[in-house]
Image: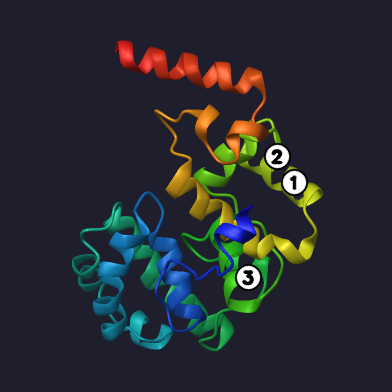
Amino acid sequence: MLENLYPETPVPLDHRNPFELLVAVLMSAQTTDLKVNEVTPALFELGPTPEAMAALDVDVIQSTIRYVGLAPTKAKNIRRLSEMLVEHHDGNVPASFEALEALPGVGHKTAGVVMAQAFGVPAFPIDTHIHRLAARWGLSNGSNVDRTERDLKAVFPKEKWNDLHLQIIFFGREHCPARWHDLNTCPICSWAATKKRIEEERRMNDKARRR
């Protein structure tokens, strides 16, 4: 069903190269992709390469991305990340989970997106949509993102991971919101979710309404 709904899986964050993708994914935490795409053209005009970005003052970066959540912290991370790419990787984005996760502001999910989308390495980065839907569909227990990642990797063949990561995100945004979602009418939840999960979400929605 996901392949029929989303035969193409374009990366939602606008970018032209691995460096721009890395910075955009870093900025997307607690911020919509739409907002990130609004500010990155001006940022990448000022700092199109790690060398150019590292030469900018943090205040300039922060001012350019000020409409993005946690802008002060992200500006410092972008500047230091760029410096480290120049100092340790000859100005290139490394194609390694370990090297990426050593950069400031880059966690496992961000590294996974870059490895998958920039370098084609199979990964299954877990965002809030994927974490929620995996639990709704009975593919994981929803205890934490590490467990969800392990469970999904065990269920699906490795060659499907990169596309599924985006397909599930697209489906979550369009059909499967976190709140006020009727699982009985959802194209996938209606048959994939357990009766227990449907009842749990119904109670959660009722409780939220009473508030």
What amino acid is labelled 3 in the image?
Met
Asked if labels 1 and 3 touch by Cβ distance under 8 angstroms, the answer is no
Q: Secondary structure at mark 3?
A: helix
| CA–CA distance in space, label 3 to label 2 | 20 Å
Q: Position of residue 81 (x, y in %)?
A: 45, 71
Residue in the picture at 61% in, 62% down:
112
- Name which of mark 3 and mark 1 comes first in the sequence: 3
- Name which of mark 3 and mark 2 comes first in the sequence: 3
Q: Which residue is mark 2?
A: 147
| CA–CA distance in space, label 1 to label 2 | 5 Å
Residue 184 against residue 105 in the figure, above or below? above
Residue 6 against residue 186 in the figure, above or below? below
Is there any visible trace of residue 155 in the rendered image?
yes
Q: Position of residue 62 (x, y in %)?
A: 24, 65
What amino acid is labelled 2 in the image?
Arg
Residue 120 against residue 165 in the figure, above or below? below
Q: In screen coordinates, is 107 left or right of 75?
A: right
Residue 54 against residue 192 in the figure, above or below? below
Q: Position of residue 37 (x, y in %)?
A: 32, 68
Q: Which residue is mark 3?
A: 115
Residue in the picture at 49% in, 46% down:
172
In depth, the one of 25 and 7 nearer the eye is 7
Q: In screen coordinates, is 165 left or right of 178?
A: right
